[in-house]
């Protein structure tokens, strides 16, 4: 029996941090569900759609259940209600910040009072730079 067997994890965001974290949780036996926004029309390829095809994301998303739904939908709230743990790497410096998308902790705990909520942000959600962007910590050639 795996350490996290029976635990359902919901992953939000496009960052590597949340994807890596939930990959590790999945390797420990958790059932990981990655929520992605609805795909754009084929002719309107976005930067996010291009990221989904990169090798590291193919690796990090292996073994995860993937669903497409907007964070402003009832389907998303149903997923929150069914999960034990939510991990998000939503970028506070851009338009996909948790606040305003029904994904901030205070809104979600009304749906699931015992929800474990993990926000992977560069500088936290309060304080001097709550909307600060992090830097890539791995040197690239």
Image (cartoon, rainbow, N blue to C red):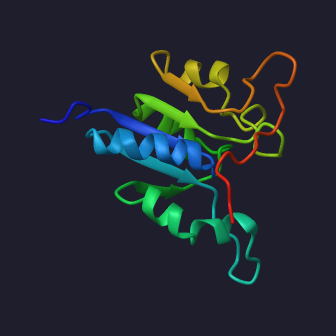
Residue lying furthest left? 1
124, 48: nearer the viewer: 124
Q: Quadrant of the N terminus?
A: top left
Residue lying furthest bottom? 43
Q: How many marks are shown on the rendered structure?
A: 0
- Report the residue at 72% width, 32% height from top: 122
User: Could you tell whether 113 is left or right of 83 in the image?
Assistant: right
4, 107: nearer the viewer: 4
* Quadrant assignment, res 28: top left
- Report the residue at 49% width, 38% height from top: 78
Work out whether 122 lies above or below 32.
Answer: above
User: Could you tell whether 5 is left or right of 140 in the image?
Assistant: left
Q: Quadrant of the C terminus?
A: bottom right
Work out whether 49 lies above or below 69.
Answer: below
17, 111: nearer the viewer: 17
**What is the x, y in percent for residue 94?**
83, 45
**What is the x, y in percent for residue 23?**
41, 47
User: Could you tell whether 102 is left or right of 83 in the image?
Assistant: right
70, 9: nearer the viewer: 9
Residue lying furthest right? 128
* Quadrant assignment, res 109: top right
- Report the residue at 86% width, 25% height from top: 129
User: Could you tell whether 49 is left or right of 33 in the image?
Assistant: right
- Report the residue at 68% width, 43% height from top: 72
**What is the x, y in percent for residue 27?**
30, 45
**What is the x, y in percent for residue 126?**
79, 18
């Amino acid at each position: 029996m795996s350490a996290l067997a029976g635990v359902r994890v919901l992953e939000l965001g496009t960052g590597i941090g949340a994807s890596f974290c939930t990959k590790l949780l999945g390797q420990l036996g958790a059932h990981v569900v990655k929520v992605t926004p609805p795909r754009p029309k084929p002719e309107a390829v976005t930067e996010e759609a291009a990221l989904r095809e990169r090798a590291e994301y193919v690796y990090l998303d292996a073994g995860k259940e993937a669903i497409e739904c907007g964070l402003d939908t009832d389907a998303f709230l149903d997923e929150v209600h069914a999960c034990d743990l939510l991990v998000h790497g939503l970028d506070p410096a851009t338009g996909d910040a948790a606040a305003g998308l029904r994904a901030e902790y205070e809104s979600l705990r009304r749906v699931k009072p015992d929800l474990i909520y993990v926000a992977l942000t560069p500088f936290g959600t309060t304080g001097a730079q709550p909307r600060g962007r992090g830097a890539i910590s791995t040197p690239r050639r």
